[in-house]
Image (cartoon, rainbow, N blue to C red):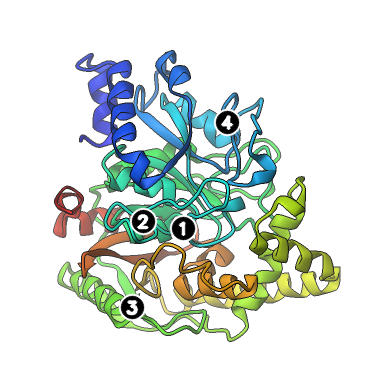
């Protein structure tokens, strides 16, 4: 399959029609979705009747994560409380996708309200990893990642509030990037006091990811926070010389869980490769280790389910527990948690400037992709929450600091992909795209998807 940028160019050259691409994608979905369960609501008739906008991705098929309202298409948030909800309006990111020429085929699977680190729910069932169907594709954007890894689409939409673009990118051998805080608008909604979540790409190629972020990025009227516009389109950074960067490598996680030595080895190998490419690599850890980080982060995370305008008796046990805890937390306790996390974020971000570091390299996850059901194996909801943190000890800190972070598919261990995280300076996605493209050229990963 061509990448999305190439497919759009072929449509503009009239080598292929949007309907051809749509029909081919539908056929691939019907062949793979019964086993993988990445698509939970289809809108094929609407897609086939669409005359796509003339944009950078004209005619390219796309899946929208089932946490984003899509006009006229059932949007469930993977919750029984919204099993029959059909929005009347598009969220801003969906409108931007349509304006860019994408053809929406349906909604990709996600856990209920995107709360946990694996794509499993009572309403929509478990999504499965194309590399090993007994394993999770990871993250709340697991449906998007599974579709791309299965070769259904070259690119899909994800969102990341605690790692949920980067987690499935690592689990599925794909490239993903969490944009800077305020880079992509949550309109017409907001995403909390620290605006943890950002929409972004999960893709095979760095080029597609950069061009997709160009489409999604930008201010919407009323946004509380927004990132400064880039000096030039992100797509122009792909292939640009990153220069000689100063890069810090660390395997010490902010959330103090034990890290699988195999994922540490992959991260160290990527750091060594960057040294071979001419960058200065040092071993140094930002001041982020915090014994109570997960419990403090929970004070923010629990607010999401509590604010959902649905019947909480229909929520899954984890979200009911989170909502109940939010109602029991005083405003002073909540404010103290926010202030503590903001203070931690300030100390962490200062590391990039005090140590003159451009990028920090870390393992992507704490372990290889776990089996389906592993997070929900214990009945106690807070133990389920803890397991999510055990899988993702390196990712939520970047949502707190608001920095951009990319997941690079660097290795395969025991038949399972292993990603490595690159964390950039605030609002500096440009450097991440440059160095990611450099790594993609030096260590091509697309062929692994065909060979798996």
Tags 4 and 2 touching, CB below 8 Å: no
Badge 1 local density, few (<14 within 10 Å), some, or many (20+)? many
Give the residue displayed 69% in from the left and 76% down from the top: 340
In the rendered structure, which disc, 1 or 2, sits on the residue that comes first in sequence? 1
The disc label shown at residue 249, or none: 3
User: Which residue bears the numbered disc 4?
Assistant: 70
Mark 1 and mark 3 lie on one chain; the one further toward the N terminus is: 1
Residue that numbered label 2 is attached to: 169
In this view of the protein, which residue sits in the foreground, 104 or 215? 104
Q: Find residue 152 and report its horizontal and vertical position in percent.
A: 30, 37
Q: Are marks 1 and 2 in contact (CB under 8 Å)?
A: yes
Is 89 located above or below residue 188 in the figure?
Answer: above
> For mark 2, does the 10 Å Cα neighbourhood hold few (<14), some (14 to 19), or many (20 or more) residues?
many
Quadrant containing the C terminus is: bottom left
Regarding mark 4 in the picture, which secondary structure is present there? loop
Which sits earlier in the primary sequence, circle 3 or circle 4? 4
Sequence-first tag of 3 and 2: 2
Q: Quadrant of the N terminus?
A: top left
Q: From mark 1 to mark 2, how far is it between C-alphas? A: 9 Å
Q: Position of residue 191 (x, y in %)?
A: 66, 51
- Element under label 3? strand
Residue at point 21%, 50% (across, down): 449
| Numbered disc in front, either 1 or 2 | 1
How far apart marks 3 and 2 lie (CA) works out to 20 Å
| Mark 3 or mark 2, whichever is nearer to me | 2
Is there any visible trace of residue 221 in the rendered image? yes
Residue 166 position, x and y percent, is: 41, 59
Image mark for residue 139? 1
């Amino acid at each position: 399959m061509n990448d999305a940028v190439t497919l759009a160019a072929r449509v503009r050259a009239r080598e292929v029609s949007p309907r051809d691409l749509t029909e081919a994608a539908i056929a691939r979905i019907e062949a793979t979705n019964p086993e993988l369960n990445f698509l939970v609501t289809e809108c094929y008739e609407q897609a086939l009747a669409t005359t796509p906008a003339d944009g950078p991705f004209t005619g390219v098929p796309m899946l929208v994560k089932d946490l984003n309202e899509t006009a006229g298409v059932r949007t469930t948030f993977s919750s029984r409380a919204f099993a029959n909800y059909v929005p009347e309006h598009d969220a801003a990111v969906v409108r931007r996708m349509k304006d860019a020429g994408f053809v929406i085929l349906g909604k990709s699977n996600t856990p209920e309200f995107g709360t946990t680190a694996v794509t499993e729910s009572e309403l929509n069932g478990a999504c499965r990893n194309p590399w090993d169907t007994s394993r999770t594709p990871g993250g709340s954007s697991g449906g998007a990642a599974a579709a791309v890894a299965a070769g259904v689409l070259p690119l899909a939409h994800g969102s990341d509030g605690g790692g949920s673009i980067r987690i499935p990118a690592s689990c599925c051998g794909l490239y993903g990037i969490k944009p800077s805080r305020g880079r992509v608008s949550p309109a017409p909604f907001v995403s909390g006091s620290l605006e943890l979540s950002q929409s972004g790409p999960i893709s095979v190629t760095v080029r597609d990811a950069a061009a997709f972020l160009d489409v999604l990025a930008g201010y919407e009227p009323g946004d509380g926070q927004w990132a400064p516009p880039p000096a030039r389109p992100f797509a122009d950074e792909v292939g640009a010389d990153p220069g000689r960067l100063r890069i810090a490598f660390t395997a010490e996680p902010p959330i103090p869980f034990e890290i699988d030595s195999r994922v540490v080895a992959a991260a160290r190998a990527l750091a060594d490769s960057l040294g071979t490419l001419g960058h200065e690599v040092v071993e140094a850890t930002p001041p982020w280790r915090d014994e109570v980080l997960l419990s403090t982060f929970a004070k923010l995370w629990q607010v999401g389910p509590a604010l959902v305008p649905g019947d909480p008796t229909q929520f899954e046990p984890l979200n009911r527990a989170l909502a109940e805890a939010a109602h029991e937390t005083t405003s002073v306790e909540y404010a103290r948690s926010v202030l503590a996390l903001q203070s931690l974020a300030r100390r962490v971000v200062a590391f990039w400037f005090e140590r003159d570091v451009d990028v920090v390299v870390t393992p992507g996850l704490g372990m290889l992709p776990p089996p389906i059901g592993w997070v929900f194996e214990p009945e106690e909801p807070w133990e389920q929450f803890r397991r999510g943190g055990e899988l993702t000890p390196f990712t939520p800190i970047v949502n707190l600091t608001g920095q951009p972070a990319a997941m690079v598919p660097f290795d395969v261990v025991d038949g399972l992909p292993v990603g490595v995280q690159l964390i950039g300076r605030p609002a500096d996605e440009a450097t991440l795209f440059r160095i990611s493209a450099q790594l993609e050229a030096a260590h091509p990963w697309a062929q692994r998807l065909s060979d798996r």
